């Protein structure tokens, strides 16, 4: 019997990047749920318990840092690993994200191969 | 009744309506005319919508067929010509829309794959035609992609557009040359920029910062020979790159120039690289009659440091100019423990004085309590 697919939440507001990453992640055998804003990511994480959350820092309605804080401050979701997607100019935010408890960060522009390698390292 | 109301209405616009049968004739003609115009407008809107939805459908059909192959191709060593087999030239615009979004967010092998689509397939010829055309939209699109893909073959065509009378064309072509790191065109960009009346200095700087840092060596070789505008922009680029090798030449310019804007740039540069050799000259400008020059000198001296300057900064807190007060308070803050202590003393001294208010503002901006001792 096949092992269940690992579930990844991917929150990002760039349509092109969502399509690309969804393709790459599904191709690697992950089950991907996409969010185009930061809204509902935490609420869905509580009910669905994903294996990993990838959060873009700059998103409409609710930014990545706020969602990260929600996830990491709830005992029900705090153990879910989070990867933050940032830009180089956001050094201060990178430090904040690591302080709040993000497991890893990756800066844009990035290589999808590097992101996939980091994901594999965290959840296999 | 209708006649009187209509007559009064048109009279308010200064139009006189004739009476009797002539009025009815004109009214009926007017109604017919308006009806025809309305129908034509509706038809035009419908046609635009139809074209739009047809284009959208074509785009979606193309993307549905092509996107997965494209994502599979990204990051792989596959030949981009294989990916483009079966893609018509009329569909290139959809393909370029997808690529454009990804150029700014992808790196490594993914970015190389994108570049290969532009440089090694028939997309290159397609964009080359765009770049050679006279249409702004097409030139801008081609310049963006050639710049992003680092294409060295189109430099001379991009250069030809620098003297365009359209600012957008200048911006995109200059940016493309900078992204390609075509150093030999840096001076041409600076010269052509003068003819662009709608171009701000900030945008010009952002363009020049797209060059790699070796642009500083290139500018340094020429800066002495050029005019004040060139010097001012070049010194800003040196400052953004923290290029210390320009210190000697910038100090010479600082000594001899009387151009206020250029002086300010020299001072900012000296402060940013903490140039100790500049202290005597900065000191002279401490008393400069122009507030902008004086403020820049205070800020620069604060960055370079020196505890002996602290009493002078305190004095400047009580000057008339608010800008100078702020610069002095920030300088005191940057001077370290002693400066902060003095700022607290001033902040507590006389609650209504301007100096006390400025001191409190700077302390509060930096989350420092006045009474924390």
Image (tube, coloured by chain):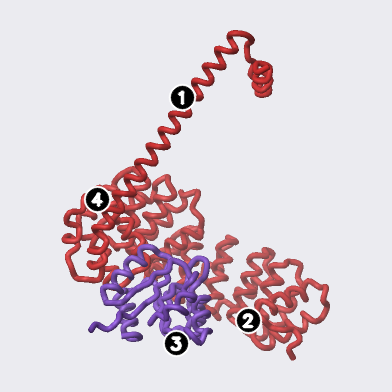
Chain colours: A purple, B red
Q: CA distance from mark 2 to mark 1?
A: 73 Å
Q: Which mark is residue B36?
A: 1
Disc 4 to disc 3: CB gap under 8 Å? no
**Position of residue B308 in the picture relative to residue A119 (left or right):** right
- At label 4, counting other C-alpha atoms closer than 10 Å, the crowd grade (few under 14, some 14-19, many 20 or more) is some
Of marks 1 and 4, the one in the foreground? 1
Q: Mark 2 and mark 3: span between their CA atoms?
A: 41 Å
Q: Which residue is mark 2?
A: B334
Q: Are marks 4 and 3 on the same chain?
A: no
- Pointer 4: what residue? B126
- N-terminal of the pair, mark 2 or mark 1, is 1
Task: For mark 2, give the secondary structure.
Answer: helix
Q: Nearer the viewer, mark 2 or mark 1?
A: 1
Chain to which the residue tagged by mark 1 belongs: B
Report the residue that reaches farthest toward the bottom: B373
4 vs 2, front mark:
4
CA–CA distance in space, label 4 to label 3: 51 Å
Disc 2 and disc 1 on one polypeptide chain: yes
- Residue drawn at x 27%, y 61% is B67
In which chain is the residue bearing label 4? B
Does dot 1 land on a helix, a strand or a loop? helix
x and y percent of residue B144 in the render? 35, 57
Residue occupied by mark 3: A79
Callout 3 environment at 10 Å: few (<14), some (14 to 19), or many (20+)?
some
């Amino acid at each position: 019997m096949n092992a269940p697919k690992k579930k990844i939440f991917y929150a990002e507001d760039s349509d092109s990047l969502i399509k690309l990453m969804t393709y790459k992640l599904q191709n690697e055998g992950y089950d991907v749920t996409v969010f185009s804003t930061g809204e509902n990511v935490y609420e869905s994480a509580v009910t669905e318990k994903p294996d990993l959350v990838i959060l873009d820092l700059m998103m409409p309605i609710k930014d990545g840092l706020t969602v990260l804080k929600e996830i990491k401050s709830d005992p029900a979701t705090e153990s879910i690993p989070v990867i933050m997607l940032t830009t180089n100019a956001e050094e201060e935010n990178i430090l904040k994200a690591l302080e709040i408890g993000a497991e890893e960060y990756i800066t844009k522009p990035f290589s999808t191969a590097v992101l996939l390698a980091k994901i594999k390292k965290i959840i296999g | 009744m209708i006649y009187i109301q209509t007559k009064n209405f048109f009279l308010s616009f200064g139009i006189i309506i004739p009476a009797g049968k002539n009025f009815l004739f004109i009214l009926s003609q007017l109604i017919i005319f308006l009806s025809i115009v309305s129908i034509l407008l509706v038809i035009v809107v419908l046609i635009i919508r139809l074209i739009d939805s047809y284009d959208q459908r074509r785009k979606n059909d193309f993307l549905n067929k092509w996107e997965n192959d494209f994502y599979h191709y990204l990051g792989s060593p596959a030949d981009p010509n294989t990916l483009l087999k079966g893609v018509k030239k009329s569909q290139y615009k959809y393909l370029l829309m997808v690529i454009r979004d990804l150029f700014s967010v992808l790196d490594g092998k993914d970015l190389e794959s994108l570049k290969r689509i532009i440089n090694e397939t028939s997309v290159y010829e397609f964009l080359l035609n765009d770049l050679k055309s006279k249409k702004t939209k097409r030139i801008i699109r081609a310049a963006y992609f050639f710049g992003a893909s680092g294409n060295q073959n189109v430099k001379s065509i991009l250069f030809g557009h620098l003297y365009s009378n359209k600012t957008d064309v200048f911006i995109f072509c200059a940016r493309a040359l900078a992204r390609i790191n075509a150093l030999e065109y840096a001076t041409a960009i600076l010269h052509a920029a003068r003819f662009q009346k709608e171009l701000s200095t900030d945008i010009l700087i952002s363009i020049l910062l797209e060059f790699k840092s070796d642009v500083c060596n290139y500018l340094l070789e020429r800066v002495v020979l050029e005019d004040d505008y060139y010097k001012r922009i070049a010194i800003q680029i040196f400052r953004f790159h923290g290029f210390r090798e320009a210190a000697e030449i910038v100090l010479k310019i600082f000594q001899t120039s009387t151009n206020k804007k250029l002086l300010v740039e020299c001072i900012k540069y000296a402060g940013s690289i903490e140039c100790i050799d500049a202290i005597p000259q900065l000191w002279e400008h401490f008393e400069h009659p122009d507030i902008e020059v004086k403020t820049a000198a205070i800020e620069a001296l604060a960055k370079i440091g020196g505890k002996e300057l602290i009493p002078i900064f305190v004095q400047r807190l009580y000057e008339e100019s608010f800008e100078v007060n702020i610069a002095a308070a920030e300088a005191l803050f940057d001077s370290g423990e002693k400066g902060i202590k003095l700022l607290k003393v001033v902040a507590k001294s006389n609650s209504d004085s301007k100096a006390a208010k400025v001191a409190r503002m700077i302390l509060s901006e930096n989350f420092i309590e006045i009474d924390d001792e």
